[in-house]
């Protein structure tokens, strides 16, 4: 219940500490006035109290003893400079995280010389410090402005930080603030820094050598910027450093043992996604004991790094894409027995997986894209995710995985064979990828697949009807059974997969009608039923595919958890070729492919409402009727293939408005009339000159077949009716007259005897004359021939 009455505070004039975090004060608009009546107050904590404003006008401030104020996690949503508390010069601790304040920080902030901690994190980058000078804040120890500043130059910002001879600033947090420029020499005096966080900005230039003077540093985070050049050797002077994060920059050069020897306190080292090369001797022993070692995309091979043998405290090791071309060492499982996350994918590591992996504490193992061979050994008991795709592992799947907590199993592109064992049923999997192997038979009847979200079985030899076990998988989001030997009819209960986004059943032997209720899958963005034996009509209610009615633009908050790892790549047949999409890009290819079936009937008009569709392929069917007139409304189409059908009528003129179209094929139909004009269509014809072939009724440019004159004026129903109404009436009248006259003659001959006798006598007489004429003419002809 909201608290609306704080009047009881008037009775506590000697109150020094007031903490009512989490109490709903959204209706207590007078809270600042009541608090202002507490002259002895030292600490005021109102975090998460649903406060809506802090810009009240207090004529006389009585809070001269207030030292700590916490208004974080409220939604003020007004200019920060209008807040009443900037005049409380006694404040030492001010917390304004996630308050939706915006605008320029006030100049009065520079006069709050007692301030020791200022935290204004996560204010949606709506604040500016362009004119705020903090040079006199000599007592400031912590400044946290993560994800709050809208822009700025990092050099100018450092120049406005405290410039005192006895600088006390220990923590500087400026993550994700769109700061540009390079790190200035003017920051060299901040030698008291213990934490320097500059992650996620646009900082350029090199890592300055004076960083070695910051000997008190424990955390140095310069990740996700645009830093270039070498890592300075002076970084080895940071003996107190526990966390070094330089990942996601453009750094190059060598990391040597001389640089790392001085980092004796280091526990967390992140150097990934640079162009760095780690060069150490084979006998080198580090002075540190790492817990996190993340070196993805650094050059560490070809031998497996021997110095890692000493890192027995590792919890997270990432040596993916590090050019290692070796076997896993014998000490691998013992040394990394504490590791929780281990990634050595994208190397050339050969040999088998260690047979003693069961002694490890691993929860996630990524070893895809190597040269691993052999079978899957007994896995670590705590393992929850295993990706060993793109190797040369073989044999049947084990009858006992040894990992009862396994939730994700990614095995695509190996040489596994045989049937899927029932041991799969003992795992509560949410992701199973067995694509591109040699599995056969059907799926086991499992009762524990209700959490299955990703099921990818393409390019195997699975057979049988549509797996009945899937009926319980109501959480499915991605289902790919393509390129197998499945057969039979598609079940009506397929519409129960209400979360389904991708459905690929192409290149099987399914037959019968497409279930009409398949259009109930409103979240579907990718449907492929191509190359089956499907018959009947295209489901009419395609407009129910609401996700396809708008162009899909991927936003960070819409990213499916784990998609990048689970769906590493997706093969999409579009634009008359197979395109391989990696990662999230596959989510933006909205596609319907029903090609190479036996579908009949018309193309549903509702399909034109799918304005976000990128690929539409209905080719190689037996569809008839006309191309939908409003097809030009499908503004996102990049590939449209309606070839090899029985479509008739004219090509809609609206097709020329499909500006994104790069592939069009209307060949081998019964289309007629003048081809619509437009630069886009002309360009497509130059790319694919056969796009109109097999339509003998089409005419006009770009074809070399001129349209008949009668057709040149036939554009629209009114002209067509006007030009054809008179001749059609004439032909209709002649036909009626002929039929009526014939029946009159027939009736006279049938019922009037005298007329009938006279009629046949006339025919006999006419026959005699013709006979005499033919005989006489023939005699004359033969006589002339004999004389000559």
Image (cartoon, helix red, strand yellow):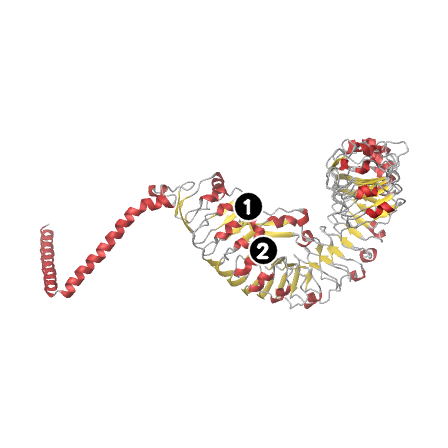
Report which residue position mark 2 lands on. 522
Which residue is nearer to you in this view: 224 or 713? Answer: 713
Which residue is nearer to you in this view: 168 or 67? Answer: 67
Residue 155 placement, left or right of 780: right
Q: Is residue 95 above or below residue 343?
A: above
x%, y% of residue 168? 88, 37
Of badges 1 and 2, the one in the foreground is: 2
Report which residue position mark 1 lands on. 636
Density class for disc 1 (Cα within 10 Å; few <14, some 14-19, many ≥20) is many
Disc 2 element: loop
Density class for disc 2 (Cα within 10 Å; few <14, some 14-19, many ≥20) is many
Residue at x 34% of width, y 42% of height: 708
x%, y% of residue 388? 70, 56
x%, y% of residue 204? 75, 35
Q: Is residue 320 above or below residue 84?
A: below
Which residue is nearer to you in this view: 497 or 565? Answer: 497
Can see residue 713? yes
Can see residue 593? no
Disc 1 element: loop
C-alpha distance separating marks 1 and 2: 19 Å
Residue 142 placement, left or right of 775: right
Residue 44 placement, left or right of 714: right
Sequence-earlier tag: 1 or 2: 2
Residue 671 placement, left or right of 520: left
* Disc number placed over residue 504 in the picture, else none: none
């Amino acid at each position: 219940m909201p608290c609306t009455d704080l009047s009881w505070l008037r009775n506590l004039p000697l109150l020094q500490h007031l903490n009512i975090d989490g109490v709903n004060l959204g209706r207590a608009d007078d809270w600042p006035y009541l608090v202002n009546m507490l002259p002895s107050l030292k600490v005021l904590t109102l975090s998460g109290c649903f406060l809506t404003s802090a810009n009240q006008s207090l004529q006389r401030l009585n809070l001269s003893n207030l030292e700590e104020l916490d208004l974080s996690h409220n939604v003020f949503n007004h200019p920060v400079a209008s807040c009443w508390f900037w005049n409380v010069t006694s404040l030492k601790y001010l917390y304004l995280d996630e308050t939706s304040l915006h605008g320029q920080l006030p100049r009065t902030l520079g006069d709050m010389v007692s301030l020791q901690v200022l935290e204004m994190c996560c204010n949606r980058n709506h604040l500016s410090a362009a004119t705020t000078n903090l040079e006199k804040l000599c007592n400031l120890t912590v400044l946290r402005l993560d994800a709050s500043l809208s822009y700025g130059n990092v050099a100018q910002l450092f120049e406005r930080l405290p410039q005192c001879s006895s600088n006390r600033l220990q923590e500087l947090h400026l993550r994700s603030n769109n700061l540009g420029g390079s790190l200035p020499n003017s920051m060299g005096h901040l030698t008291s820094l213990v934490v320097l966080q500059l992650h996620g900005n646009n900082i350029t230039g090199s890592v300055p050598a004076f960083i070695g003077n910051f000997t008190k540093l424990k955390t140095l985070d310069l990740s996700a910027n645009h830093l270039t050049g070498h890592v300075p050797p002076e970084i080895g002077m940071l003996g107190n450093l526990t966390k070094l994060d330089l990942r996601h920059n453009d750094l190059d050069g060598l990391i040597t043992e001389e640089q790392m020897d001085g980092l004796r306190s280091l526990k967390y080292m992140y150097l990934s996604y640079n162009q760095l090369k780690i060069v150490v001797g084979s006998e080198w022993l580090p002075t540190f004991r790492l817990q996190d070692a993340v070196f993805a995309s650094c050059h560490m091979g070809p031998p497996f790094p021997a110095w890692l043998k000493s890192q027995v405290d590792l919890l997270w090791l990432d040596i993916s894409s590090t050019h290692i071309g070796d076997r896993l060492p014998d000490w691998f499982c013992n040394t990394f027995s504490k590791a929780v996350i281990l990634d050595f994918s994208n190397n050339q590591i050969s040999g088998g997986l260690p047979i003693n992996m069961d002694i490890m504490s691993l929860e996630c193992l990524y070893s895809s894209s190597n040269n691993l061979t052999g079978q899957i050994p007994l896995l670590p008991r705590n393992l929850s995710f295993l990706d060993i795709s793109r190797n040369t592992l073989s044999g049947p799947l084990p009858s006992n995985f040894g990992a009862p907590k396994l939730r994700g199993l990614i095995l695509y592109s190996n040489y596994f064979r045989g049937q899927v064992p029932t041991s799969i049923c003992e795992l509560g999997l949410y992701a199973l990828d067995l694509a591109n192997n040699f599995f056969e038979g059907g799926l086991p009847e499992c009762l524990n697949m209700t959490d299955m979200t990703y099921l990818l079985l393409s390019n195997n030899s699975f057979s049988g009807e549509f797996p009945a076990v899937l009926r319980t998988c109501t959480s499915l989001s991605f289902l790919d059974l393509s390129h197998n030997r499945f057969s039979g009819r598609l079940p009506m209960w397929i519409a129960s997969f209400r979360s389904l986004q991708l459905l690929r059943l192409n290149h099987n032997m399914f037959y019968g009608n497409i279930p009409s209720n398949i259009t109930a899958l409103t979240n579907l963005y990718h449907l492929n039923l191509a190359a089956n034996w499907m018959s009947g009509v295209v489901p009419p209610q395609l407009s129910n595919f609401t996700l396809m009615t708008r162009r899909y633009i991927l936003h960070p908050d819409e990213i499916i958890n784990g998609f990048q790892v689970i769906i590493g790549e997706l093969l999409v047949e579009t634009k008359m070729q197979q395109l391989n999409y990696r990662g999230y890009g596959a989510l933006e290819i909205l596609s319907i492919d029903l090609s190479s079936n036996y579908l009949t009937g018309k193309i549903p008009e509702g399909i034109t409402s799918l304005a976000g569709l990128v690929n539409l392929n209905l080719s190689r069917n037996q569809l008839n009727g006309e191309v939908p007139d409003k097809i030009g409304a499908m503004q996102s189409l990049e590939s449209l293939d309606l070839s090899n059908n029985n479509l008739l009528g004219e090509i809609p003129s609206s097709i020329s408005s499909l500006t994104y179209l790069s592939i069009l094929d209307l060949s081998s139909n019964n289309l007629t009339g003048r081809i619509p004009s437009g630069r886009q269509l002309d360009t497509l014809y130059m790319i694919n000159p056969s796009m109109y072939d097999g339509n003998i009724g089409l005419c006009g440019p770009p074809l070399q077949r001129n349209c008949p004159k009668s057709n040149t004026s036939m554009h629209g129903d009114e002209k067509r009716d006007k030009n054809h109404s008179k001749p059609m009436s004439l032909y209709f009248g002649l036909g009626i007259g002929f039929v009526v006259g014939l029946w009159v003659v027939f009736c006279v001959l049938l019922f009037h005897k005298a007329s009938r006798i006279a009629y046949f006598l006339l025919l006999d007489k006419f026959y005699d004359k013709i006979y005499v004429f033919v005989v006489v003419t023939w005699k004359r002809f033969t006589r002339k021939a004999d004389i000559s």
